[in-house]
Image: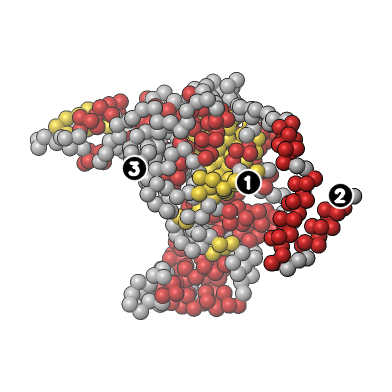
């Protein structure tokens, strides 16, 4: 009877005017407290079984989507739904727990990748542009080092060179994120078993000679002694040092260097420490838009599992680095394709989790959002991005070639190309598919095309149309109108301060829910691995070459 009275009371109070609503809530609370007195509530809570001690994860996957905000994820969700008639979804949609991170760094409201990477890796907020050191210049340990010290093997995977900002933050200690050559020494010092991504960059260290003076060359050669082939003084007394390449440093540091697909596929457990460079041998692996060849991120993760699995488990960090590039270039198809590639890699970890659900933790987040991308803007044809065959910079090159050819034809009185809009319409179809554009979009493209083809028009001149913000009018308009057609609008070419999503599944996944600082991820992982150990930690200071 009392239960029915409570329901009636709550219902009648809900119909009350605002002035009576607060008082009504108090009445409901009083009734509830009469049903269960305070002392009885306390006794009941004491009788509740205590939560079980959280198990230690044997396998940890830490995925970081560089530049990935929640709108980028939503774009991927809608793309999958519309291109598969709702039959497939992102792997990210299979995670039961979601949270969000604040991304600011110690000295800037909008962070860069090295500062945010350091926070995600070490649990320390640090300054813009530095990797693996705190605001005082002291080296700090990453969660990867922590796990390695606890017997777990470690893999670092990315779509860029591993000395770049975010992956580098897991093993480098540099006051400037661009120090790839010194980063090679940090890489071999880490002892991590598996690196896979872009090539070992900054292969030529000769530029160090111009930065080394008589006052600091002794410190430099002490730090990099393993890389100095010879050190002589020129006639002016300036030291001239002959260096090993960064690649040689890594090889001489005990790492097997693999840069062919055949060599990659042939890697087997027990092969020792390895650095895998994508066969393209570039700073990063090819963008997925318009390029379908393997290996890609998911292949690196599969091989990492194969090589790292052992009795004590492993830690693997995997960065989808080029979602960020799609944001910087305001290129919706590039953003989407890189997100899908990243999600494919996450799918590999999820399959592993299904086989080892009681021993695996997977955490997915981002270092920051890039582009301040709003989604759902004007258009709703996200599925049309399936026709995209190139990134926007490649389209711009194609248009420049076309325009130069038209002018050449005009000079030679050739009728091969006339410079009509119909000709570039075919170019759009070739690279972005036969998408249906509204009449308004076509009119804006025609206007921009006319300006671009005018040999007297200067995009940066005094009479330039401000609508195109100093860019080539036609290329700018194509990018803007296609993004709008796909449903995306970018508000900056840089990073934003937007919170980043956090997805988690597996052992201890609940630790990563809620709205928290980005430092929480590494700290929570460390507490799961060893709740008694100190973390974050900076057990040593390391000399850092300043130049």
Read off the residue under disc 2.
2
Nearer-N-terminus badge (1/3)? 1
* Mark 1 → mark 3, Cα distance in angstroms: 33 Å
Tell which of 158 and 54 is nearer to you.
Answer: 54
Q: Which sits earlier in the primary sequence, circle 1 or circle 2?
A: 2
Query: Number of marks in the image?
Result: 3
Q: In this view, does 413 lie above or below 93?
A: below
Q: Residue at x 39, y 27 (%)?
A: 539
Q: Which residue is drawn at 78% across and 65% down?
A: 15
On the question of residue 491 being in view, the answer is yes
Left or right of 461 in this view: 8: right
User: Which of label 3 and label 2 is nearer to you?
Assistant: 2
* Residue 496 on image: x %, y %: 47, 56
The residues tagged by marks 1 and 2 sit, at their Cα atoms, a distance apart of: 38 Å
| Residue 342 in view | no
Q: Where is residue 152 in the image (x, y as percent from the top left)?
A: 54, 24
Question: Image point 75% across, 46% down: which residue?
Answer: 33
Is disc 2 surrounded by few (<14), some (14 to 19) or many (20+) residues within 10 Å? few
Residue depicted at x 73% and y 34%: 43
Q: Check the image and name the residue furthest to the left.
A: 235
- Mark linked to residue 98: 1
Kind of element beneath mark 1:
strand
Give how far apart the Cα atoms at labels 3 and 2 are: 68 Å
In this picture, is 105 found above or below 521?
below
**Residue 176 tag number:** 3
In the picture shown, does residue 328 fall above or below 43? below
């Amino acid at each position: 009877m009392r239960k029915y009275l409570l329901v009636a009371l709550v219902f009648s109070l809900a119909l009350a005017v605002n002035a009576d609503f607060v008082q009504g809530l108090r009445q409901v609370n009083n009734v509830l407290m009469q049903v269960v007195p305070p002392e009885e509530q306390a006794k009941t809570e004491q009788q509740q079984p205590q939560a079980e001690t959280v198990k230690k994860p044997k396998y940890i996957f830490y995925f970081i989507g560089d530049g990935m905000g929640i709108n980028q994820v939503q774009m991927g969700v809608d793309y999958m739904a519309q291109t598969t008639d709702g039959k497939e979804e992102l792997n990210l949609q299979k995670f039961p727990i979601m949270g969000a991170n604040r991304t600011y760094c110690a000295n800037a409201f909008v962070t860069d990748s090295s500062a945010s990477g350091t926070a995600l890796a070490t649990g320390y907020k640090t300054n813009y542009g530095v990797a693996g050191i705190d605001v005082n210049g002291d080296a700090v340990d990453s969660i990867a080092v922590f796990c390695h010290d606890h017997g777990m093997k470690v893999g670092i995977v990315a779509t860029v060179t591993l000395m770049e900002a975010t992956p580098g933050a897991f093993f480098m200690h540099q006051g400037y994120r661009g120090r790839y050559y010194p980063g090679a020494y940090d890489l071999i010092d880490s002892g991590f078993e598996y690196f896979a991504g872009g090539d070992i960059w900054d292969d030529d260290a000769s530029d160090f000679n111009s930065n080394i003076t008589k006052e600091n060359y002794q410190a430099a050669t002490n730090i990099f002694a393993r890389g100095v082939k010879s050190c002589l003084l020129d006639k002016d007394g300036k030291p001239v040092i002959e260096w090993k390449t960064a690649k040689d440093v890594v090889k001489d540091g005990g790492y097997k260097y693999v840069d062919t697909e055949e060599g990659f596929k042939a890697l087997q457990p027990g092969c020792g420490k390895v650095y895998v460079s994508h066969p393209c041998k570039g700073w990063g692996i090819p963008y997925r838009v318009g390029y379908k060849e393997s290996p890609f991120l998911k292949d690196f993760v599969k091989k990492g599992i194969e090589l790292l699995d052992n009795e004590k488990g492993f830690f693997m960090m995997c960065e989808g680095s080029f979602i960020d590039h799609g944001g910087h270039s305001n290129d919706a198809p590039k953003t989407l394709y890189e997100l899908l590639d990243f999600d494919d890699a996450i799918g590999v970890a999820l399959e592993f989790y299904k086989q080892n659900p009681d021993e695996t933790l997977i955490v997915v987040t981002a270092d920051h959002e890039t582009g301040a991308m709003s989604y759902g803007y004007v258009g709703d044809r996200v599925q049309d991005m399936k026709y995209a065959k190139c990134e926007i910079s490649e389209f711009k090159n194609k248009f420049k070639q076309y325009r130069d050819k038209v002018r050449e034809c005009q000079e030679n009185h050739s009728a091969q190309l006339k410079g009509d809009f119909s000709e570039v319409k075919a170019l759009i179809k070739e690279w972005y598919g036969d998408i249906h554009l509204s009449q308004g979009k076509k009119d804006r493209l025609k206007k921009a095309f006319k300006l671009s083809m005018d040999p007297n028009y200067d995009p940066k001149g005094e009479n330039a149309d401000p609508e195109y913000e100093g860019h080539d009018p036609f290329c700018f308009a194509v990018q803007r109108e296609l993004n709008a057609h796909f449903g995306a609008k970018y508000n900056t070419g840089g990073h934003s301060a937007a919170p980043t999503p956090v997805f988690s599944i597996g052992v201890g996944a609940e630790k990563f829910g809620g709205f928290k600082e980005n430092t929480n991820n590494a700290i929570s992982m460390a507490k799961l691995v060893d709740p008694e150990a100190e973390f974050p930690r900076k057990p040593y200071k390391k000399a850092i070459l300043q130049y």
